[in-house]
Image (cartoon, rainbow, N blue to C red):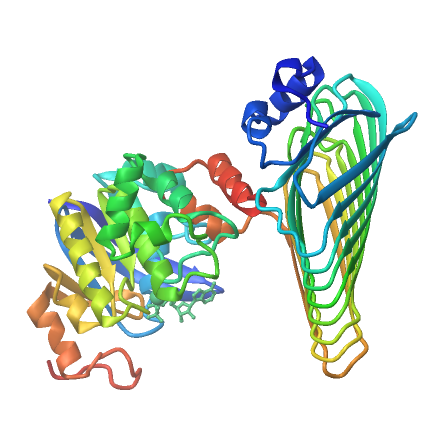
């Protein structure tokens, strides 16, 4: 059963069509990967689903639980159970990791905050009192972002390149966090450029030029990686053998 | 002379209650030096070895000379409480502080005007930090909800070779009223100056900050940091000047202001370099709450107002 449906969604940014007839069905309780070349519109799709400002003037329909999300503000979507782990998470001057996690957490107790930090491989004693500012490394910030999502226990998570800037050891933690989300029966839509991450998914989509170019099981879609061939990466090379 | 706990005056109790500090946690420990000043009266003084205070009560305030003897390290921060409990009053404080060579002290000062309708607090401080000495001053203001306070702190600082001066001014509880901070610091070779002001203004509060750091000695380092949040009709003007005159002097001026409602903020960072081997930078960010920060918190379920509050809380923390 689908929890999220995008029907023929088009969105222009700066006068350019970025999403162009995007249609997707996201199944409840499954992990979906979205791959596609730089500039394909993956982050734009994530922003649109979350309802971020500048991404609300789309045509087509977006449904969550069968309910249209048109005119539903970001915080209301979050309270419906949708959240987004950003590709490049924001930095907050002076805001402590503890307060940042607590803001999102369903269970705000210290023990729970420690647990989610552990789940992303950050030692709670060393991180709870750090600021979520520029003193965290890129990878640490991404993991704090993921910890905040775990604490929130959302029904649908969009993870925009959860692996970017993450070292090999930490990648295992990201996968473990994915298992936690599965156990919570969350639905995951993860955008990635990594074959290893793609292989964690149940299903995958290939997004090109703002629309779904291919979809199916992970094995089928991973062939685009194995052949080092993203059919839409080079405009003149419209099709390639898969 | 120590004020025994049993005879603690009601004013002292009121001052401590207003700042949310249990007086017994301060007065119960003989290793914590503390001073309580209400308007023009010294209500309590407790000293520790190597820390000397001479205070003179005047008609409109207090003049005090404080000295930390050379090489003495005062382990626990000295607690100072200045206050005016009545709704109206004038308090002029003159401070002459010397931290002698190699000495180290931290001062935790509270300035409390919890019921002020028309209170004026002036502070005129001269601070000398000796060679390789360390002075850390944290000043926290507690103002009432009326905004009837005018605070005018003026500080002249001299940091000798290898000395360290750090100050953190916090006015985030209650209304500002009017504040006019004026700080001028001169830093000798290899000394370190670190100045931070955190102020939250609302309604018709007026905030003016004018800080100058002169890095005159080789390798001196200085940072002037200002974090301000403004709402309603509040206004803030920040003039921060950093002058580097010596080789390898390093400085940074940083001003962050979040502005909401009809508030108006102005920041004028001035950096001046008079030596080709010196280096100073500045950064000013003034505006509404950053939309990415806001939407990040909203994507976790916070309302816009809750998100703004949390972002401001971080900035002012
Ligand atoms: N505000 C904007 N105005 C104009 N063009 C924009 C705007 N925002 C994004 N774009 C363009 O939209 C396209 C899609 O951007 P998007 O960030 O969604 O790509 P992506 O698939 O996430 O790429 P990447 O893999 O690099 O993260 C890009 O070509 C980008 O330059
Ligand atoms: Mg992207």
Name the quadrant of the N terminus of chain B: top right
Say whether residue B49 is left or right of residue A232: right
Where ligand 2 lies, by quadrant? bottom left
Say whether residue A130 is left or right of residue A1: right
Q: Quadrant of residue A112?
A: top left
Q: Nearer the viewer, residue A127 or A46?
A: A127
Q: Nearer the viewer, residue A46 or B37?
A: B37
Q: Is residue B170 visible?
A: no
**In this view, which residue lies farthest toward the bottom?**
A236
- Please provide percent x and percent y for residue B189: 73, 72
Q: How many marks?
A: 0
Q: Eyeballing the image, is A78 above or below A215?
A: above
Q: Eyeballing the image, is B29 above or below B230?
A: above
Q: Nearer the viewer, residue B6 or B284?
A: B6
- Please provide percent x and percent y for residue B47: 68, 36
Q: Nearer the viewer, residue B120 or B1?
A: B1
Q: Eyeballing the image, is B197 above or below B249?
A: above
Name the residue rendered at 10%, 59% in the picture: A202
Say whether residue A136 is left or right of residue A121: right
Name the residue rendered at 80%, 71% in the picture: B216
Q: Quadrant of residue A178?
A: bottom left
Q: Is residue A137 visible?
A: yes
- Please provide percent x and percent y for residue B209: 77, 48
Name the residue rendered at 72%, 60% in the picture: B101
Q: Eyeballing the image, is A54 above or below B41?
A: below
């Amino acid at each position: 059963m689908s929890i999220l449906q995008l029907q023929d969604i088009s969105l222009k940014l700066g006068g350019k069509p970025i999403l162009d007839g995007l249609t997707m069905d996201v199944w409840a309780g499954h992990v979906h990967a979205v791959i596609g070349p730089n500039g394909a519109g993956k982050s734009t799709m994530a922003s649109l689903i979350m309802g971020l400002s500048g991404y609300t003037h789309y045509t087509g329909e977006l449904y969550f639980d069968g309910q249209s999300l048109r005119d539903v503000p970001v915080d209301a979507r979050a309270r419906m159970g949708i959240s987004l782990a950003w590709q490049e998470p924001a930095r907050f001057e002076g805001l402590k990791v503890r307060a940042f996690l607590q803001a999102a957490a369903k269970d705000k107790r210290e023990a729970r905050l420690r647990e989610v930090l552990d789940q992303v491989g950050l030692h709670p004693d060393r991180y709870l009192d750090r600021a979520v500012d520029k003193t965290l490394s890129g990878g640490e910030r991404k993991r704090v972002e993921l910890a905040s999502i775990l604490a929130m226990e959302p029904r649908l998570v969009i993870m925009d390149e959860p692996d970017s800037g993450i070292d090999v050891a930490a990648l295992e933690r990201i996968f473990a966090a994915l298992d936690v989300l599965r156990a919570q029966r969350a639905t995951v839509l993860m955008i990635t450029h990594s074959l290893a991450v793609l292989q964690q998914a149940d299903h995958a989509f290939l997004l090109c030029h703002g629309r779904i170019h291919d979809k199916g099981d992970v094995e089928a879609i991973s062939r685009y990686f194995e052949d080092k061939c993203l059919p839409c990466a080079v405009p003149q090379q419209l099709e390639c053998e898969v | 002379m120590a004020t025994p706990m049993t005879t603690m005056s009601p004013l002292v109790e009121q001052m401590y209650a207003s700042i949310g500090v249990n007086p017994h946690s301060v007065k119960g420990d003989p290793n914590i030096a503390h001073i309580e000043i209400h308007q023009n009266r010294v209500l309590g003084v407790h000293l520790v070895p190597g820390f000397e205070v001479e205070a003179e009560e005047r008609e409109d305030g207090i003049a005090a000379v404080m000295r930390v003897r050379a090489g003495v390290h005062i382990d626990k921060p000295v607690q100072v409480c200045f206050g005016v409990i009545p709704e109206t009053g004038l308090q002029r404080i003159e401070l002459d502080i010397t931290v002698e060579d190699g000495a180290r002290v931290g001062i935790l000062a509270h300035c409390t005007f919890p019921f002020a309708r028309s209170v004026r607090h002036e502070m005129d401080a001269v601070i000398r930090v000796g060679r390789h000495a360390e002075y850390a001053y944290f000043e926290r203001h507690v103002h009432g909800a009326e905004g009837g306070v005018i605070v005018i702190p003026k500080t002249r600082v001299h940091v000798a070779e290898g000395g360290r001066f750090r100050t953190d001014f916090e006015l985030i509880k209650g209304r500002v009223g009017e504040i006019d901070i004026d700080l001028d610091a001169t830093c000798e070779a290899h000394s370190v100056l670190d100045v931070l002001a955190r102020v939250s203004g609302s309604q018709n509060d007026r905030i003016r900050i004018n800080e100058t750091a002169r890095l005159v000695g080789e390798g001196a380092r200085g940072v002037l940091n200002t974090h301000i949040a403004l709402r309603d009709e509040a206004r803030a003007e920040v003039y921060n000047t950093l002058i580097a005159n010596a080789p390898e002097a390093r400085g940074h001026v940083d001003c962050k202001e979040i502005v909401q409602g009809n508030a108006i903020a102005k920041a004028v960072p001035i950096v001046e370099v008079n030596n080709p081997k010196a280096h100073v930078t500045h950064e000013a960010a003034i505006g509404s709450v950053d939309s990415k920060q806001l939407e990040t918190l909203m994507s976790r379920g916070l309302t816009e107002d809750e998100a703004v509050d949390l972002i401001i809380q971080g900035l002012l923390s």
